[in-house]
Amino acid sequence: MFKRVVKLNCQMFNSHHCGSAKVLLLIMMLIVSLCIGIYVSVRNADQSQRPSSNERVKVLRPNRAAVESEHRIAERPSKPREKVHPIDEVKSQAEGATEHRTDKNEGTRSISPPAHGLGRPSIDALKAHLPSAIKEALDGIEVRKPVWQLELSRLSVSEGLVALSFDAHFTNEYVPPILEVLKRYNVRATFFVTGHWADSFPSTLKAIALHGHEIGNHTYSHPKLTELSDDEIVGEIKHAEQSILKAIGNDGPLTPYVRPPYGDRDERVVRVLLSSGYIPTYWAVDGLDWKKGVSEGEVIRRVVTKSTSGDIVLLHATSKVTSNSLSDIIEGLLQKGLQPCSVTELIMRAEVK
């Protein structure tokens, strides 16, 4: 093509002009060749950096299985946030408050359970460990003290002990699982039962005694003692005592502890009990497991956070909430450095003042 152009130009111009035209054409060809070379070089360099056609497909079209997997994950409902168990909250609050030994195989323990055997504790055996006001009142001495000093609710002990007590008046449905938990932790407790309950569930009361727990008196029919005369108060206690011994035998672990139903007592009631040879037994911590609508978490938190060494804790053997939460309650107390025990064990470890 270029030759034809040169030939044509030579025909149009004379030989002088034809020579000049050749020089110009050569220069133009060099410039065009240079531009083409630069373009080709740049294009090759760009092609070398781009992925091949197959590679471009892989980049632009991700693996279908991967996409479907991502969609399934996106559509899957999110896992609800794990609820913090109340007991974990209690453990974190108690951490560092008391030193304890942890064994992966045996669990967490603070101190060894008291070695004092239960059986039937006598008033004389208990007197040496009771607060002086209660001891003197049992001996018939006129004591001018407020009600709280004439009953058991909290004792001064050098070790970290907490007495677990369970009231029973209605059903026996939740007693077996409660006994199983106490057995698992080697804990002995005090069950305050009514005579009516003993008559209704004698085999269950017998099982409580056979498991090594002690029995307290909760009256026969669960009345408010402040509304009864002195004789009626004693009659309720004696009637309950007969029903309890009928179920567990005369040598059973019946204690002289009496818990007024509803916690309803005044100075007159307390003095009637003491003068009759019984020890009024109240509590320092109420688990409120009897309260309608109360949750397991609330009972756990209340008992564990409020309990201190020497306290008597009130729970109910007729409560499903307590049956379900007792294991966590005991674990929480142990984590806090408090060993659960019976009322008698607490008394026998008390520091006399």
Image (cartoon, grey):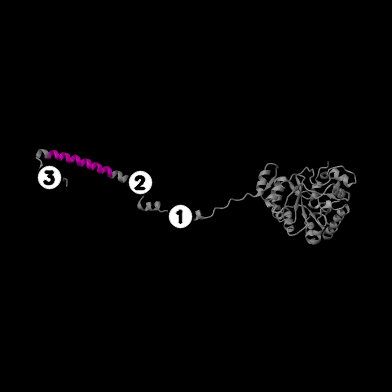
Which of the two discs, 3 and 1, labels the residue nearer the N terminus? 3
Q: Dots 3 and 1: beta carbons under 8 Å?
A: no
Q: Quadrant of residue 204?
A: bottom right
Q: Residue at x 14, y 38 (%)?
A: 20
Q: Secondary structure at mark 3?
A: helix
Residue extending furthest toward the left: 14
Q: Residue at x 23, y 43 (%)?
A: 33
Q: Secondary structure at mark 2?
A: helix
Q: Is residue 160 magenta?
A: no
Which of the two discs, 1 and 2, labels the residue nearer the N terminus? 2
Q: Identify residue type, mark 3.
A: Leu
Which residue, given by chain and number where applicable, does mark 2 sit on? 49
Q: Mark 3 against mark 2, which lies toward the viewer?
A: 3
In the foreground, 137 or 207: 137
Q: Dots 3 and 2: beta carbons under 8 Å?
A: no
The magenta region covers: 18-39
Residue 174 in the figure: left or right of residue 8: right
Q: Identify residue type, mark 1.
A: Val
Residue 91 horizontal/vertical position (percent) = 67, 46
Separation (CA) of disc 1 from disc 2: 27 Å
Which residue, given by chain and number where applicable, does mark 3 sit on? 8
Which of the two discs, 3 and 2, labels the residue nearer the N terminus? 3
Q: Identify residue type, mark 2.
A: Gln
Q: Looking at the figure, which quarter contains the C terminus?
A: top right
